Image: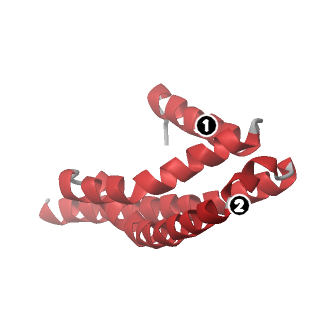
Amino acid sequence: MQYNIRTLLIVTALAATLVWAIFVPPQWAGWIAISALYLLAPSLTLASIVYYRGPWQAFCIGAAPWMAGIACFDFIYVVGVIRQLNGGGWFEMFSKPDDQVILMKIYLTVPFLMAAGSGLLAMFIRTSADKSLRQDRH
């Protein structure tokens, strides 16, 4: 299998962004970026299921169960933040030691990696099914 330069650059950019979000100080900036992704990912997945076709639609359908879990987590998380804002505890995030924040960010990244794996598996199944259907027609 041969990769093109565009794919290589996209994968490199995604890996660099992930490393930045998890390890580069200030730690709270990466935490805010991952939290923003948590808020946007379920709606982006749903819109992609509706508007994409072919392998990308299969990817989004495969990632959808994980995104549904992320949406449930978002609701619980937002309710928790609102409760902590009333008590003033939300700002403790900015004073936590770096190693605790890095560990928390790694935990927050795992569902996205699982969603990507599920989506890639669904994409592989879709392309394999398309190839076998084309072979059966000939």
Q: CA distance from mark 1 to mark 2?
A: 29 Å
From what the image shows, is residue 9 above or below residue 122?
above
Badge 2 marks a residue whose secondary structure is: loop
Between 16 and 30, the one lying in front of the other is 30
SS of the residue under disc 1: helix
Labelled disc at residue 125: none
- Residue ID at (49%, 50%): 37
Residue toward you, 99 or 10: 99
Label 1 vs label 2, nearer the camera: 2
Query: Taking the image as drawn, is residue 25 in sight?
Result: yes
Residue, x 46% and y 69% (percent of image)?
75
Residue 44 spot, x, y in % from top left: 34, 52
Report which quarter residue 92 is drawn in: bottom right
Query: Dot 2: within a 10 Å radius of its alpha carbon, few (fewer than 14), some, or many (20 or more) residues?
Result: few
* Quarter holding residue 88: bottom right
In-image side of 30 versus 1 (left or right):
right
Q: Tell me if mark 1 has few (under 14), some (14-19) or many (20+) residues whose alpha carbon lies within 10 angstroms of its own.
A: few
Q: State left or right for residue 13 relative to residue 58.
A: right
Q: Residue at x 57, y 43 (%)?
A: 33
Q: Position of residue 98 (x, y in %)?
A: 84, 48
Type of amino acid at the residue the image marks with label 1: Thr
- Residue 112 x/y as whole percent: 54, 59
The numbered mark at residue 17 is 1
Nearer to the camera, 108 or 80: 80
Q: Is residue 72 above or below residue 6?
A: below
Q: Who comes first in sequence, dot 1 or dot 2? A: 1
* Residue tagged 2: 89
Report the label total.
2
Q: In this rendering, does residue 110 appear at all?
A: no
